[in-house]
Structure formats: structure tokens, C-alpha cells
Image (tube, grey):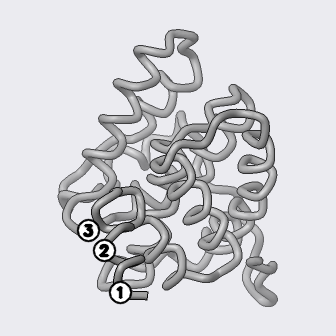
Amino acid sequence: MYKTLAGIRTNRMIQLNDPKWKELKGGYQTPYDASIALSRLEETNSSEEVDDILAELWDELHHQGDVGLASYFAVPHLIRIARDKGIISSNVLGLIAVIEIQRHKKNPQIPKEYLESYLNSFNEIPELVDSAKSREWDLEFTAAALSALAASKGQIKIAQAVLNFDDEDVLDEFLENY
């Protein structure tokens, strides 16, 4: 589990109405104002619109292993919205896991004044996963949930490995070799 970082001033992530969003880069390393999609996600009650918004966020916040500051700043909001609205899906959990996995690779670093808030948001992942205990877990959801849970505990390599098991062929190939 991520712990509070000593010596770093606690600061909340930027709010959705902050104009800084317009300057932040997403997965394509171009400006992407994720606050617009996150605000729409927060407001909608349509499952179809939720799916469309999450597809947009997946596309814009992560691209071929690249993430940007917009990606990081979106994570605490995604977690909060998922919790508040009960949007516990493979798309939400998988995107959160992917962003955290990619943060540990050759991507921009989170500014120190925001790092603690970002890391603390991962403390809510176990509760999100637990809230889905009574639903049916297909392979895609199971991989996303376990990957997000591993990421929330700082187990990045495990998070990455598990996330790849959302494909039946990859899982079968792995099991054949072990």
C-alpha cells in the first residue's frame, strides 16, 4: 500500500474546473483537457455515455505506453467518480492500473506537490474492488481488478503481468508453460 510521503506538502490534485487542465498532455503527448470528459462522467446517468467517455479517456490518456500529466491528474478523479457513482468496471480499473504501470516507465514524473495526493488515491482501490464482490467476474474484469489491486499495493510488475491475462490466448499460453 502506498503511504503518505514525509516531507512533501499535502496538496489535493487539481480540481476539474481548474484552467491548468487545458495545458496538460495526455498519452499522445499533446494537450488533452481530461476535465471535460471527467466532468461528463461525473454528471451522466447513461451507461452508454459512461462507456463512450471511458473509451475516450482510454484513448486520450494512454497511447502505446505513453502517459502524461493529464493521465496522472485524472486518476484520483476516476477513483472518486467510480466510488461515488458505483462505476466499477474493467475499463475504470484497467485504465487506472495502466496509468500507474506506465508511470514507472519512461514517462513524465508527477510534480512533487501532487505526488502524495496521487498515491493516496490508490488507497481506495481495495474498497472499489471489494464493492464488486457480488457481481460476476469475467476474465477481463478479473484481470483489471487484480491489476489495479496490485498497483495499489505498489506491486507494479505483478500489476502489469496480471493485466496481460485479460486475453484468453495469453492466459492459455502462460498456463501451458507453467
Judged from the image, the secondary structure of the residue bearing numbered disc 2 is: helix
Q: Are marks 2 and 1 in contact (CB under 8 Å)?
A: yes
Front-lying residue, 145 or 13: 145
Q: What x and y, as percent, mark residue 3?
A: 80, 80
Note whether 11 is above or below 127 in the view shown. below
**Disc 3 vs disc 1: which is toward the camera?**
1
- Disc 1 packing (10 Å; few <14; some 14–19; many ≥20): few
Q: What x and y, as percent, mark residue 31?
A: 24, 51
> Which residue bears the numbered disc 3?
66
What amino acid type is highlighted by mark number 2? Glu
Judged from the image, the secondary structure of the residue bearing numbered disc 3 is: loop
Judged from the image, the secondary structure of the residue bearing numbered disc 1 is: helix
What amino acid type is highlighted by mark number 3? Asp
Q: Which residue is at the far front?
A: 176
> Which residue bears the numbered disc 1?
177
Q: Quadrant of the N terminus?
A: bottom right
Q: Is residue 1 visible?
A: yes
Q: Which residue is at the far top?
A: 46
The answer to whether residue 73 is left or right of residue 125 is left
> Which residue bears the numbered disc 2?
173
The answer to whether residue 88 is left or right of residue 120 is left
